[in-house]
Image (tube, coloured by chain):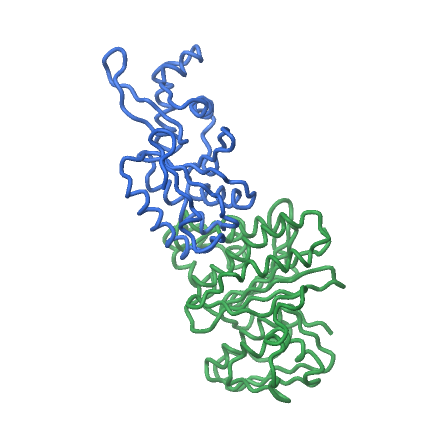
């Protein structure tokens, strides 16, 4: 596992598979245990990029037991995003598995984010798009660009996105001295 | 005379239920001119093995011998998977055609067993590659190949999770160029989907539990319903969604029901002409997909 930008780490899924074809729940559970060991070996790492390079095929059951299960297990605490995902079927299968478990999974392709699986509600969609465009976000920054939106309302949107697994957050001290949350995209 | 799954069902219904009490001897008779299609072959093989497993005397009689459909079945590996206790007339083939010619015909994938203790990791790939070769004339062939792999991987994995009997599951593929279609059959002789699903639904979903077996089966493929709860069941649903994109028909035989699902308005709908309940018992779940060779 290699460290990537800042607090992120890279996991190459193929390294934990027997070959380039991942299918079935049993194989998925086996690979999940290997991924879990990798994650637990670096407790300081908060964001994991999972590279799909070399994964020729992966069915819905396999992606459900591995990628989606991992993201769901660590929701709100650690973030998992996918990179090097070019195969249409693998992507479609990740989407179906993540939708079923109501878990969002962000895929990064040439700096652009696409969310598979669970989708944000209409009320939080704009806030998510805002957050995905910058590494870190505060509710006050979102409000500054949306006149008429209250800080309380914006905070609620970001909190929902964090709870549902779209974003991560950490506590910080606001300029006023109080507590404020800083939200970060999973990248 | 072609014998597909529907013709096979008619033949079994016309006879006494082979799994029935008081039945100790079962004969399958293949008259001159009968040509068994792959969906029927897999179901007959499953049924013969089930009957032999329950200590019944089973006999397959091929009037034309190896010159007829028996020769085809041998080429597909039928007799390699047939229980040894089953009697074959005039005689079992001396050599397995599948063992000699395996993999040499692009238009078929010989019968493969599905056993969770002896996983054939490459089986979904072999079936998908055969679809790729068979349907090469389709413009959407690459997409179809990818989708087909997922469908087979999910179906075969589903067989593993329902294989509560010592009998193997089976899968095979055959192309029918004259009929412009390609058929893939996947069967298991374990507990049927309903037997495992219904008890769980009674507690978790009274609405679904109240549906008839046929309606519930349609919902398994439409919504994805699993005995393991709301976050499972995505495999069969996803497979059906992919098969539907390519306008594949789906024929599903459960222990006593059969349903034919056809694509209609973006989802699968039962073709009522081919749906029947109260059929003679056949253990397990038997699924056959039919794809067009030309889109």
Q: Chain A, which colour? A: blue
The mark tally for this picture is 0
> Residue B227 placed where, x, y %?
41, 55
In this rendering, the answer to whether A118 lies above or below B117 is above
Residue that lies at the very extreme toward the front in this rendered image: A2
**Relative to residue B68, is residue A18 drawn left or right?**
left
> Residue B220 placed where, x, y %?
50, 53
> Residue B112 placed where, x, y %?
54, 69
Depth check, front residue: B32 or A89: A89
Q: In this view of the protein, can residue B5 be seen by the observer?
A: no
Residue that lies at the very extreme toward the bottom in this rendered image: B90
Residue drawn at point x = 43 percent, y = 73 percent = B166
Residue drawn at point x = 39 percent, y = 15 percent = A141
> In which image quadrant can residue B7 be found?
bottom right
In this rendering, the answer to whether B136 lies above or below A184 is below
> In which image quadrant can residue B68 be found?
bottom right
**Relative to residue B294, is residue B290 drawn left or right?**
left
Depth check, front residue: B259 or B112: B112
Q: In this view of the protein, can residue B271 be seen by the observer?
A: yes
Residue drawn at point x = 66 percent, y = 50 percent = B141
> In which image quadrant can residue A150 be found?
top left
In this rendering, the answer to whether A5 lies above or below B137 is above
> Residue B1 placed where, x, y %?
74, 74
Residue that lies at the very extreme toward the right in this rendered image: B178
Which chain is painted in green?
B
Depth check, front residue: B185 or B101: B101
């Amino acid at each position: 596992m290699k460290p990537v930008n800042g607090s992120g780490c890279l996991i190459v899924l193929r390294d934990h598979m027997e070959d380039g074809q991942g299918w079935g729940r049993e194989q998925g559970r086996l690979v999940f245990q290997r991924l879990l060991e990798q994650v637990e070996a670096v407790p300081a790492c908060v964001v994991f990029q999972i590279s799909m390079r070399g994964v020729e095929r992966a069915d819905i059951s396999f992606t459900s037991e591995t990628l989606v299960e991992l993201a769901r297990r660590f929701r709100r605490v650690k973030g998992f995003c996918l990179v090097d995902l070019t195969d249409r079927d693998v992507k479609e299968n990740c989407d179906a598995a993540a939708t079923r478990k109501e878990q969002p999974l962000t895929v990064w392709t040439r700096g652009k984010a696409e969310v598979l699986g669970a989708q944000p509600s209409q009320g939080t969609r704009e806030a998510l798009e805002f957050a995905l465009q910058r590494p870190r976000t505060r509710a006050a920054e979102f409000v500054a660009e949306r006149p008429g939106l209250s800080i309380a309302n914006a905070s609620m949107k970001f909190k929902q996105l964090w709870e549902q697994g779209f974003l991560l957050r950490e506590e910080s001290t606001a300029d006023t001295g109080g507590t404020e949350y800083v939200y970060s995209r999973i990248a | 005379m072609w014998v597909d799954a529907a013709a096979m069902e008619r033949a079994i219904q016309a006879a006494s239920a082979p799994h029935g009490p008081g039945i100790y001897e079962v004969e399958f008779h293949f008259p001159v001119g009968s040509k068994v299609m792959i969906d029927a072959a897999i179901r007959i093989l499953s049924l013969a093995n089930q009957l032999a497993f329950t200590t019944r005397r089973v006999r397959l009689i091929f009037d034309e011998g190896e010159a007829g459909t028996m020769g085809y079945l041998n080429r597909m590996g039928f007799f390699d998977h047939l229980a040894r206790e089953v009697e074959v007339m005039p005689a079992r083939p001396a050599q397995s055609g599948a063992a000699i010619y395996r993999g040499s015909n692009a238009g078929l994938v010989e019968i493969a067993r599905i056993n969770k203790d002896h996983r054939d990791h490459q089986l979904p790939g072999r079936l998908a590659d055969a679809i790729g070769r068979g349907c090469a004339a389709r413009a959407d062939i690459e997409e179809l190949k990818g989708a087909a792999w997922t469908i087979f991987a999910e179906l075969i994995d589903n067989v593993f999770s329902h294989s509560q009997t010592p009998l193997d599951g089976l899968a095979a593929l055959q192309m029918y160029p004259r009929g412009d279609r390609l058929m893939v059959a996947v069967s298991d002789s374990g507990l049927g989907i309903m037997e495992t699903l219904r008890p769980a639904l009674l507690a978790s979903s009274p609405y679904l539990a109240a549906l008839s077996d046929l309606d519930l089966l349609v919902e398994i493929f439409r919504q994805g319903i699993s005995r393991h709860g709301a976050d499972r069941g995505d495999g069969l649903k996803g497979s059906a969604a992919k098969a539907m994109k390519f306008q594949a028909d789906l024929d599903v035989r459960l222990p006593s029901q059969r349903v034919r699902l056809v694509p209609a308005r973006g989802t699968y709908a039962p073709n009522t002409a081919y749906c029947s309940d109260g059929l003679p018992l056949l253990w397990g779940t038997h699924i056959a997909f039919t794809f067009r060779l030309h889109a």
